[in-house]
Image (tube, coloured by chain):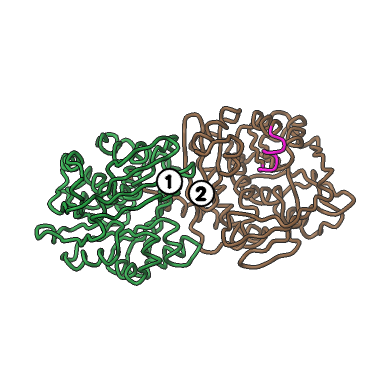
Chain colours: A green, B brown
Amino acid sequence: MAEPVLIVGSIALDSVETPFGQEVEVLGGAATYASIAASFLAPVRVVGVVGQDFPQGYLDLLASKGIDLEGVRAEPGRTFRWVGRYDYDLNVAHTINTELNVFEHFRPEIPEGYRTTPYLFLANIDPTLQLRVLDQVNKPALTASDTMNFWINGKRDQVIEVLRRSDVSLLNDAEVRMLTGTANLVTAARQVLDLGPSCTVIKKGEHGAVMCTNTSYFAAPGYPLEVVKDPTGAGDAFAGGLIGYLAYTGDASDGNLRKAIVYGSVLASFTVEDFSIRRLERLTHDEIAERYQRFHEIASFEA
Amino acid sequence: MAEPVLIVGSIALDSVETPFGQEVEVLGGAATYASIAASFLAPVRVVGVVGQDFPQGYLDLLASKGIDLEGVRAEPGRTFRWVGRYDYDLNVAHTINTELNVFEHFRPEIPEGYRTTPYLFLANIDPTLQLRVLDQVNKPALTASDTMNFWINGKRDQVIEVLRRSDVSLLNDAEVRMLTGTANLVTAARQVLDLGPSCTVIKKGEHGAVMCTNTSYFAAPGYPLEVVKDPTGAGDAFAGGLIGYLAYTGDASDGNLRKAIVYGSVLASFTVEDFSIRRLERLTHDEIAERYQRFHEIASFEA
């Protein structure tokens, strides 16, 4: 029986332009992507904030995935908006504009019924708020956390405190290098382990992901997609797939962490096939299982 | 019984500076790295040119690895020299100086006894010379070829003709993008297949390597090295390990190509652990077998 997952982070309206198209004020946000991805594997509870202008249709969409929205508050004002662009190097997001709106005064309040949730994912938000969440919950069986360059630069001590209280650290290659001041990714990953987490996962976009623990190193391949329409949310869907699988199985052994990373990669690979959460919206369990097997074929060779 | 491999390319004296040290006029060259790497797996024959100043000790070193040097001519003049630097981004070589010397008038002559060699690796040289080699040999069982940005820009037609006559194309990610004008690596790899080879291998440095055929896609991980002293020759050692393993087994099935790519990755991963060919010089078969198993552990997850 899958255990529930609590996800705390942003819910946004994104306007995105890529070489393959353009979308205005579509559903986005780290908590959104992570929640939908995790919902294929485990019951999901979200804590976030939206404005009064947030389309009911989007809330209905999340609810239709079985996502518990008790922790999503609608506040007076406009929803958080992000405007960004990707050029042909789809690994790099160019932010054109960020309107925090109701997100500016977001102070996560964890509903009573969520406080003993055994799996927690702290998506990328101000680490002060991530710590506020950690202070409100009973110590989860497993806590995974993400962050970004902005907080690593501006609130380094708090980022490190979040890591100290996390079991799984999720960072991309640029972030882990910035956090540790170390160019070599393996050394950098080990330095993150020294900060507290028992597992460091480095997301490398088209090059896949690697995991480093004190006793193991695992590399998951990137999926050979020929068309990437919109990379927004890939890292968040990765995290959602990862923690969703861990919650589904209740098993954080090395072998199962590896499988969780591949499930994360599967969810991320679907996410980028269309704008916003559209591909996730129509994704099926069979497609997930099939792509997991494809990942296995891609990485397989005889011992 | 391993079949022999013929390797045609440069033999050089390299002066290299990296953040981890500096070496002056040490043994280098694509044919050198590829030959030593392949020599662990199959008998190797080399065709190349050196100057009269080329140290006898280096020839003795190659001979001590069982490498047949009948095809290496000593010409009047100085040996080919390359001077380069790597900064902390060890994926990018900065050429400070190239002295072609005897290499300027290199016209590969394949000795009579080499012309029926079943495995051929055309290391990176002027594609006109690669074609000259292909004209002198009986069609090998398997031909692998490499090139570089300089020839893709300057002698594109000849590069394409070499690919038409190759079975395995070896390129790095920047080269395959330049050759095809396509940013997406999977699409680019497929476009290379359309030019002739039945197998495209893309070398991605620290991110590993991928292989694409008309029916299969394989991703080999990068090896988690914490110290990379000198990346020079990694791609050539990769090619040597790959073709050496194919010659050793006489089997170019999909499963065996995958193993060959991992053997190539193993040889490349050792190469960068020290300057010049030093790590390869003292490498043992046991170390190769052990690292192959490490690669397998790194990439493994349950289906």
* Residue B223 in sight in this render: yes
The span shown in magenta is B148-156
**Circle 1: residue type:** Pro
Q: Chain of mark 2?
A: B
Is residue B282 or residue B205 the one in the foreground?
A: B205
Assign the magenta stretch its main secondary structure.
helix
The residue sitting at the right extreme is B76
Q: Chain of mark 1?
A: A
Report crowding for label 2: few under 14, some 14 to 19, many 20 or more residues within 10 A (C-alpha): many
| Residue that carries the numbered disc 1 in the rendered image | A221
Residue A289 in view: no
Taking the spot 32% from the left edge, 69% from the top edge, the residue there is: A196
Q: Residues within 10 Å of mark 1 (few under 14, many from 20)?
A: many
Q: Amino acid at mark 2?
A: Gly
Q: Position of residue A32 (x, y in %)?
A: 25, 47
Residue at the (42%, 45%) spot, across then down = A85
What residue does disc 2 label? B208
Task: Say whether marks 2 and 1 touch (CB < 8 Å).
Answer: yes
* In this view, B111 is above or below B35: above
Q: Quadrant of the N terminus of chain B?
A: top right
Near-viewer residue (A241 or B267): A241
Decide whether residue B185 is among the magenta residues. no
Q: Nearer the viewer, residue A265 or B246?
A: A265
